[in-house]
Amino acid sequence: MIEIKNLHKSYKMGSNSLHVLKGIDFSVAEGELVAIMGSSGSGKSTLLNILGMLDTADSGDYVLDGVPIENLNETKAAQYRNKFLGFIFQSFNLINYKSAMENVALPLYYQKVNRKERQEKALNYLERVGLKQWATHLPSELSGGQKQRVAIARAMAAEPKVLLADEPTGALDSKTSYEVMDLIQKINDDGNTILVVTHEEDIAEMCKRIVHLKDGVIVEDKKVEQVRASAYV
Amino acid sequence: MFNRDRWNEILQVLTANWFRTVLTAFGVFWGIFILIILLAAGKGLENGIRADFGNIATNTMFMWTQNVTKAYKGLPKDRNFNFKVDDVDAIKRSVPGLRYISPRNQSGGFQGAGNVIRGMKSGSFQIYGDYPEIIRQQPMDITSGRFINYSDIREKRKVAVIGTDVRKSLYDLGETVLGSYIKVNGVNFMIIGTYHKSNTDGNADAQKDIYTPFTTFSQVFNRADNVGWMAITAVDGTPITGIKEDVFSVLKERHSIHPEDIRAIGHFDLFEQFSRVVRLFGALEFIAYFVGVLVLLSGIIGVSNIMLIVVKERTKEIGIRRALGEGPWSIKKQILMESIFLTIISGMAGIVFGALLIYGINYILEMNGPVDMFVNPNVNLGVVVVALIILIVSGLLAGFIPANSAIKVRPIEALRTE
Ligand SMILES: Nc1ncnc2c1ncn2[C@@H]1O[C@H](COP(=O)(O)OP(=O)(O)OP(=O)(O)O)[C@@H](O)[C@H]1O
Ligand SMILES: [Mg+2]
């Protein structure tokens, strides 16, 4: 599903540049649930952003579902993001003046799905994250865990090939974190490919594979026995 | 364009901060309002002045003889001369582009006290000897009967057309006027018509004239072939101002007047006067547009400014949208439409309020009777259309910079802003 080779990225700040990713080779098969770990500043978010086409690498190859990702203009990149990728952010990033349902329906709007179908799908996904009765509520009326679940529903709505989650539980307490992980696991059970950046060991344990980044290179890449989050909920 | 979600979004964004939106809108509102009011005021002035000119054929000049001021061909200066009836044909022959040439004679008025008598009643009025065309050069409404025609001229009929004020002072209410006789300087004339001039030019005596056929007048008042003055109208498209010198030349030649004697023939060029006024209207309209558009411009800069702030505030949101797959064009379009919508709505409000104010002014003018030089201020549909086009264009301009700045930020940076 994801294939990257010798990926380099550095940030230029004035005269000096900071080499963040120093040749990453990495592939993810369909249906995997991968945790990306590493100390702060190790380049986890940078990697995820490049995978999400929000940022571009300096060099290296990136193939997503057989499509080489290179030299995209912004219009093309937007289309690919919409079609291939779903994002889950640490700070939820819901649009605050839109209701839960409108937020979930947004990626479908960019796919030019008609209004009625959009609403149906959005409701459907909200139901799957257990928030159907909150459909008309604004994000400000939701708790952190609920917001993240809306965000997950939104990421799912466009039926992307890969879900990218950057510290999805970073702003949540452990109980809520487990609920969110439970949801992510269930989505993964349905066959979706998911990458989760996390600092927390227990969250990482709930994935099927853990990749360790250090100073811009992968130092460890191991399969793990998945801990089911439902046990803690 | 007609996408419900887009409009929802526009409304959501614009109503998110009511106070700011209204303040911003006010700039544009004010600009269009001023523009409309200025244009309407200009139009009111124009209408007022045009009403003063009435429906006179404005491409007209009046000329009369004065004293000769240069000796020429053995003739002394300071002599008098008269236009002759033959001059009319001579002018017609040698100057192309003339529509009407009306020779006129005149008597009475202030020096002829009590010159008109009917039974026991009498009055002093201006008596004119005229050709039928004069009614086109000095329009009047024939309220009963008819005006002088060429049969009257040919047969030298003793007939007259009188003004409403003449009728009032010589006739009792309800008396038959047509077919009755009045005595002008001792000669009986039959009344064939009455007139009323709607354009009085502030002249209190406008309804006190008596028109008789030119030929009759000359005969009964012993004017021989003399012509007192002439009203000359050129065809449309040939300004009389341009060919009046040709007319003068013909007359100077015929009357042995030095070609450079500019004072021998006096004239009044209505067209020149009128053109001056028309130019003034043009200038007024220009000023209205100039001022209005400048005021509008400051409103537009206001909109642009606010849109920039809105975009800045929404940077993060725009980042999220782009992460979810909204294309840059869609974002640009959104911002542009917001800005156009805001400008058009506030501009429409300006147009509507301007129109209401104009309506109110018209109402008051109507209630309190006419005001000098100011009639029916209004803006026509053309102006409204122009204003709308200006609004759409300015909305586009106002949104252009903000829209570009919205997509200039890379999505990852947009997401990182707080
Ligand atoms: N836009 C940027 N400009 C300059 N330097 C940046 C930028 N983004 C990240 N960096 C630097 O790149 C390095 C890697 O950043 P990144 O955000 O990928 O780390 P991370 O692994 O996600 O850390 P954390 O766990 O704290 O989120 C850091 O040293 C950071 O300071
Ligand atoms: Mg990070």
Image (tube, coloured by chain):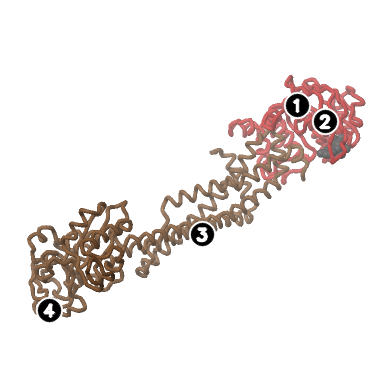
Chain colours: A red, B brown
Q: Three-letter amino acid code at disc 1?
A: Val
Residue A203: percent from the left, percent from the top? 86, 32
Q: Three-letter amino acid code at disc 2?
A: Leu
Crowd around label 1: few <14 · some 14–19 · many ≥20 (10 Å): many
**How far apart in space, not on screen, are marks 3 and 1 (Cα)?**
57 Å
Q: Which residue is drawn at 31% across and 66% down?
A: B262
Q: Three-letter amino acid code at disc 3?
A: Ile
Crowd around label 3: few <14 · some 14–19 · many ≥20 (10 Å): many
Judging by the rendered image, the residue that carries numbered circle 2 is: A47
Judging by the rendered image, the residue that carries numbered circle 1 is: A162
The image quadrant of residue A217 is: top right
Q: Is residue B400 left or right of residue B135?
A: right
Q: Do the residues labelled 2 and 1 touch (CB within 8 Å)?
A: no
Give the quarter of the figure containing the C terminus of chain B.
Answer: top right
Q: B71 or A77, which lies in front? A: B71
Judging by the rendered image, the residue that carries numbered circle 4 is: B121
